[in-house]
Amino acid sequence: MQELRRLSLERHPGNLPDAFALPFDVEESDDTHFAHHGIACPPSIARSVAKRKAEYLAGRRAAMAALSEAGAEAGDLAIGPSRAPAWPQGFIGSITHAVGIAAAVATRENAVRGVGIDIEHVVAPGAFDAIVQSVVDAAERKVLAALARRFGEPMALTIAFSAKESFYKATAAEVGRVFEFSALKIVDSNEVAIEAEIAESLAPALLAGMRFRLGYSLLDDSTAITSCAWNR
């Protein structure tokens, strides 16, 4: 059975604590693993396919480790009304899944207003054009040129996609609705972060023109992790 490991977000903006990651293998997934780890299996998950069960369990195990690190005494992490995790009172966090890996981060609610993390494997060649069309515009691709020279264009695009996903997760509770990738424009980047600007007002606390620094790092040559934390 795979073991949890720490993912340092020290170089990411936002003073986030370590995330916890857990690789998983769908072929080794077993429904008895839920009880073994003290994680409830909700009916909606019990009815789902093996992949969904495996990523849910891995994500919840990572989240429980992150909550324990943050000082929470939570026995489980249920699914909330909006399908997002129902974090314990006084705490906030984010869970992410990609093929074969899940990760989570948690912190005290008074430290940030919203937090999001996202893990993505590098975009496949067959999906490249579709991602380009839906995630970034021509101006953003120019900004990403420096990342493309460093990591290659597929990974630069993956980082951009993942960073916008992290922003969405961090602001979803505040915005309360789905919004397009075009609502956030990438305007700059450096070795550890992407700077992005809200292009259209999303909520009273998230107005057009506000800028966010979205952290990124590579877990390996084909996998990126990004983060977004915004304060009160």
Image (tube, grey):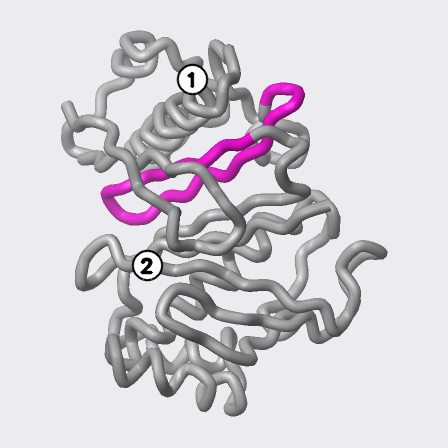
Could you tell me the amino acid type at mark 1? Cys
Q: Main secondary structure of the magenta part?
A: strand
In the image, the segment drawn in magenta is: 88-107
Q: Is residue 103 magenta?
A: yes
Label 2: element kind? strand
Q: Nearer the viewer, residue 163 or 176?
A: 163
The mark nearer the N terminus, 2 or 1, is 1
Disc 1: which residue: 41
- Quadrant hosting residue 89: top right
Left or right: where 54 falls relative to 86 = left
Horizontal placement of 17 versus 26: left or right? right
Report the residue marked by disc 2.
217
**Residue plotted at (22% across, 34% down):** 24
Q: Is residue 166 magenta?
A: no
Residue 50's place in the image compared with 219, above or below, is above
Q: Mark 1 Cα within 10 Å, few/some/many (few <14, many 20+)? A: some
Residue at 17% x, 28% y: name it: 2
Q: Marks 2/1: CA distance?
A: 32 Å
Question: Of discs 2 and 1, which sits in the foreground?
Answer: 2
Q: Position of residue 145 (x, y in %)?
A: 37, 87
Residue 126 as seen in the image, left or right of residue 188: left
Name the residue located 57 percent from the left edge and 49 percent from the top edge: 229
Q: Position of residue 154 (x, y in %)?
A: 29, 76
- Which picture quadrant has residue 146? bottom left
| Mark 2 surroundings: few (<14), some (14-19) or many (≥20) residues within 10 A | some
